[in-house]
Image (cartoon, rainbow, N blue to C red):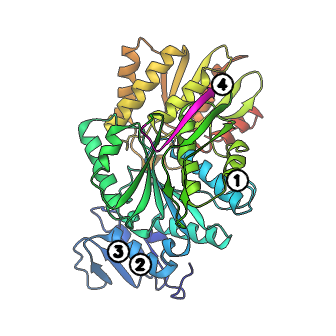
Amino acid sequence: MRNHFGTTGATADPHKVRDGMIFVDLSGKRDRKDIYTASKNGASLIFTSRNIYDPELPVIKVRDPHSTLVTLLGKFLGHPGEAVSLIAVVGSSDSHVLMDMIECIMYRDSGLQYGKDASEIIPSIRYSRMMSIEGMFERIGRLSDLGIKRIPVSLNTDSKDLYFLSGIGYDCSILTDTGFSSGAAENERTISAYQAFFSRMPAHRPVFINGDQQDVMQAVAHCKQIIPITYGMNMKAAVTASSMNIDLTTGFTYCLQRSFETKAGNLIEPFETSLRMNLTGQHYIYQALAAITCALYYDIPMDTVKTALEGYRPVSRQFKKIFEGNYTVMDHYCRSVSDMEAAMEAVQLLQYKRLFAVVSIDEGDAADHHKERAKTMAEWSRVLNCTEVVLTSCMDDDYEAKEMPLKAVKVYKRFFKEAGLSSLKYYYMLQHALLHALSQLQEGDLLLILGGEEMNDAQRYIRKLNTGVKLVF
């Protein structure tokens, strides 16, 4: 997966353009600032969907700039699906947990130690607004060079690039969503995104789907070229769980009820096996069922799979204790309602005097998402007797590039008022929100941090605040 065109390359970031490179305009902005910046930096060609009449600009108009960029990157960096086996992890529910589990299994099967080898050097491929398409291609190439040939790629359904990324050639896919609960319009967009994605997958490839959710099943029912393999708790699923035992750890029996064919053409016959993970909550069983079945598709021995999952310790922000002293601070990666519920279920097992929470919000999210999260947070705050919830839009580094989340704050205020709760505050910077929350904590209290990548710096801020280092605001 190397550049076959010397110093030539393609990018959608005008600031990364160098002499001779190709720039693809994905911005959709009305102004032409990005196009002129790319030209000034030496772009040899500029692809855009807009009408540009400046004869000094090397512009070619195309209908689909995203598709053009994917095609160009395939030429320059190699088509990822040809060099490695790509596993598409599609959806917004608990995909980060599933990614960790798959990587843990695949690393062990490759003779690497998860969290010690490549995962510390090259982060997981979790495509979002924070990763460029070319960045994803480059990261796949770097992992391939380290000898990792089975690579999961997380694709969130709210990504506008989902359709175009479906054409890079996946071996199999996992649909992680646990059901739709948004408004009708948002659900329709999600269904369309699924159908468009799976319609471009190579024919006769397996898709592992949560069979407990009929709306998710119906969303891909018309995608005839895929091979659906269901997992879940109902007895009709191809893969299910029994003998569940959940406390501070989670034990269950993995049950393959129907045979299926592996990538190599081997037939996996029905069987059962028990295992116990150092995670708390039934929702983790769903992720384990999908990860195990995916590993079996690649003929990875069950002993290797069990050893990987039973020894797995989350290396990401998975209900992670980041400070323990007079009070405790827990950090949980949270992008969906199910992520939020998972954290709250785990909180129920902990001992604490008072509970505080810092929650990330983003004005760019759909209105239905704000309502779901606000409603869930208000309900759990009442159940857990949460003393205060602090909202933040994490604008520490690029606050001028974002909108103030006024609509989102109003939605939270409405649901908290309906729940009879008044303990709600907002800070536009993450470090200010954390500073306020920490100032309220007393001995025996618990602070819960909930958010996505935008809250990755929370642990650093907490460490500085608890060592007396003054933060620069």
- Dominant secondary structure (helix, strand or loop) of the stretch shown in magenta: strand
Residue tagged 3 = 68
Question: In the rendered image, which quarter contains the N terminus?
Answer: bottom right
**Cα distance between the residues tagged 4 and 1:** 25 Å
- Mark 3 or mark 4, earlier in chain: 3
Residue type, label 3 = Thr
Residue type, label 4 = Asp
Q: Could you tell me which secondary element the residue under label 2 belongs to?
A: helix
Task: Give the x, y percent position of residue 222.
Answer: 27, 53
Q: Nearer the viewer, mark 4 or mark 1?
A: 1
Find out whether the residues at labels 4 and 2 contact each other: C-beta distance under 8 Å: no
Q: Is residue 243 in the magenta section?
A: yes
Task: Give the x, y percent position of residue 44.
Answer: 40, 85
**Cα distance between the residues tagged 4 and 2:** 50 Å
Which label sits on residue 72? 2
Find out whether the residues at labels 3 and 2 contact each other: C-beta distance under 8 Å: yes
Which label sits on residue 304? 1
